[in-house]
Image (tube, rainbow, N blue to C red):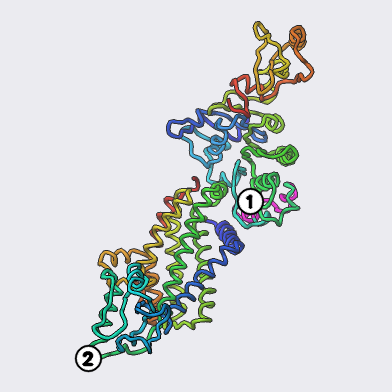
Amino acid sequence: MRFERLWAVFYARNLEFFRDRSALGWNFIFPFLIVLGFGVIFSGKGFKEYRIGIFPHPSGTVSLDRAKIPAGFKEIRYAEFIGIHSLEEGLEKLRHHRIDFLLETGLAPHRYWIDDSSPKAYAIEGVFKGSLSPANVETLVQKEEIQGKQIRYIDWFFPGILSMNMMFSALWGVGYIVVRYRKNGVLKRLHATPLTALEYLLAQILSRLFLLIFTLTVVWIGCNLFFSFTVEGSYADLFIVFGVGGLSMCALGLLLASRGSSEEFTDGVLNFITWPMMFLSEVWFSIDSAPEWIKLASKALPLTHMVKAARKVMNDGAGLSEVTLELTVLISIAVVCLVAGAALFSWRK
Amino acid sequence: MVQPLLEIIDITKRYGEITAVDGVSVAVDEGTCFGLLGPNGAGKTTLLEIIEGILPQSAGEILYKGLPRPASFREEVGIQFQQTALLSFLTIRETLRTFQRLYRKSRDLKGLIRECRLEEIVDQHNDKISGGQRQRLLLALALVNDPELLFLDEPSTGLDPHARRDLWDIIERQKSLGKTLVLTTHYMEEAQHLCDEVAIMDHGKIIARGTPEALVSTHCKGATVSLPQSGFPEIQEGFPWPVQKIRERVVIHTDAVNSCLAVLMRNGAQLDEMVIRSPNLEDVFLNLTGHQLRNEK
C-alpha cells in the first residue's frame, strides 16, 4: 500500500464533493430542514396529535368557550377541535382519517362516532369517557412526575436525525458513486494504473468519512443556533460514536457496491436497506411495543446501535464504557463489510 | 536474436459460447509501433485489454521482456482506452496531477502539457473540452508515467482530420523517443501512417501480419479502378478482372491497368468520374475477407 496513491484518490474525491454545488447544498440543507421542521412541529404547545370533529358547527377552528361539549373534554391536550357542518361531512372525514373522533354538540346523552380500526380513536374515546367521570375520580389515582432534568423532544430527536442523514450520505455517497464509476468506466481507467483495490476502497471510505464528519459539524453548529442542544455527555465521545457509526455505514455501502454496474438496481437495493433502517432504528419513534421479531431484526441494523449510542451520550451523559456494546457491534459490522466488500470488489462491469 | 518486448502466445478469450479471441500469437519488438487492424467486433480491444492485464484470458500466455508480466507491469506501461470517463469536477491539470500521483515514476507535468498541446485548456474542467482535446488529454494520461510500452485503443476514433493529425504528431514523437507502441484501429490510414508492423484481425483471429508495405505487395498486386455504377456497362460476362459493387461504385482490381482501361473504353464505359489508385490495407482486408473494414459485411 502506498500513501501517495491513497491520498490522490482521497483528495480528488473530496474536490468532486465540494465542487458539486447542488449535491453539496443538499447535504447540508436536508438535515437542517428536517431538524428545523420537526423541532417546530413537535416542540411545545403547537403540536397537535389528535383531530376531533365537532358538529354541527361552522367550519374552521372551534371556539371552545362557546362550544356545547363536556367541559372536561375541552381541557384535553395535544388535540385540535375542528368545526364540521353536518353529520354526513363528519362521517366522510372520519372514513378518510382526516379526523380521529366525531362529536355532536349538545347535552347528554352525548353522541360520538369513531373508526374502530383507528388506535387514536380508541385513545380519544377513553379520554372522552374519562372527561365525563365524577370529579372524585382524583381520589382514586395518584399522579407522579419524572424526577431530574427532562429530555426535550428535540434533544431526543436530533441524534436520530443526524445518524439517519449520515446513513443516507454514506450509503449513497459510497455505494451509488462506486457503481456509477464502474458503469461509466472510471474504475476501469483507475484499474489501468498501479492503484490497488484496497487503496481505492480505503480512499473512498476515508473521504466519505471526512465529508460525513464535516457535514455533521456544520449541521450541528447551524441547528444549535436555533435549538441550543443539551449534550449531557462529552463531545469527544459523541464524535467517536458518530465516527464509528459513519465508518460502519460507509463499509456497508462499499459492500453493496462491490459488484454490479446498474444504478437502478443499486438504487433499489439501497432503498431496500435504508427504509427498514429508517423505521426500525427508533429514529422517529420507539419500537418497544413492536413484536419481538421486529425488535430482534432492529438489533441487526447498524443505525439502531448508532442512534442508541448517540442518545445515550447526548441525552443520558453516558461515557464510552457505557456504549461499548453499540461500538463493538458497529466496528464488527464495519470490519465484516470491509473485508467482504474488498474480497468481492470488481473494477469491471 | 533479439528478445521481443512483448510476446502473446496462443491467447484465447471466450464468453460462454462466443470466442472473442481465438488462439492469437504475436510478438512486438522494442521500439516499434505494432498495429491491430480490423473492423468493429473483430476482437482487437479484447485482445489489447488481455495484454494490458485488464481482462483475464481463457487460455494462452503473455510474456513481457521474456517473463510473465511482473507486479510492476502497470508502473511501466501507459494505457489509453477507447472510451473512458474521468473523475468529475476536476480541471485538466488536477486530473493529470491525480494520475501522476498514482505512479512511482512520473513525467514533469509542464512538459507533458506542452507536448500534448493542453496549455490553453489546462484550467478547464475535464468534461468541458472538445473531442480532440479530450483524446489528447487521455493520451497525456497514458504518458504521465513516461511508459516504456504504450497501449492505444482506437486513439483517433471520432476525430476530425485536423484533430487526428494533431494526435498522430504526438504519437509519432513517442515513436521517435524509442517507445514501443501497440495500437488498435479500424482506420487503414492510421495503421499505414503510424505502424511499423500490422496484424489484421477478423472474427477473433489474425489473418495476416507484416509491414504495411509487405501486406499490400503480398495480398494486393496491381491497382484499383473505381467508377460509378451508372457509368459501368453490362459487360460482367467474361470480364477478365474481379468486380465488386461498393455503395454506388464499381471497384475493379487489376494488375494490368492499361488493358483494363482499354476493355472499359471498348465497352463504352463512362470514365469521367473514374479513380485509379494503388492498393492499401483496406484492399488487403477486402481481398482477405471479402468485406470492408469500416462497413462490416
Q: Is residue B36 above or below residue B286?
A: below
Farthest left residue in view: A140
Q: Is residue A255 above or below residue A311?
A: above
Please say whether residue A318 is visible from this viewpoint. no
Q: Position of residue B44 (x, y in %)?
A: 57, 33
Chain letter, disc 1 residue: B
**Residue at horizontal 31 percent and vertical 89 percent from the top:** A71
Q: Position of residue B125 (x, y in %)?
A: 67, 55
In the image, A44: left or right of B103?
A: left
Q: Main secondary structure of the magenta part?
A: helix
In the image, A212: left or right of B181?
A: left
Residue located beneath label 1 in the image? B105
Kind of residue sitting beneath label 2: Pro
> Same subunit under labels 2 and 1?
no
Q: Nearer the viewer, mark 2 or mark 1?
A: 2
What segment carries the magenta color? Answer: B95-115
Query: Mark 1 falls on what kind of element?
Result: loop
Quadrant for residue A17, please give it.
bottom right
Q: Are marks 2 and 1 in contact (CB under 8 Å)?
A: no
Of A134 and B99, the residue lying toward us = A134
Q: Position of residue B81 (x, y in %)?
A: 60, 42
**Residue at horizontal 30 percent and vertical 84 percent from the top:** A106
Kind of residue sitting beneath label 1: Lys
Instruction: Report if residue A70 lies within the magenta region.
Output: no
Q: Position of residue B7 (x, y in %)?
A: 56, 32
Chain letter, disc 2 residue: A
Quadrant for residue A244, please give it.
bottom left
Please say whether residue A83 is visible from this viewpoint. yes
Few, some or many residues within 10 Å of mark 1 (<14, 14–19, 20+): few
Quadrant for residue A102, please give it.
bottom left
Residue located beneath label 2 in the image? A134
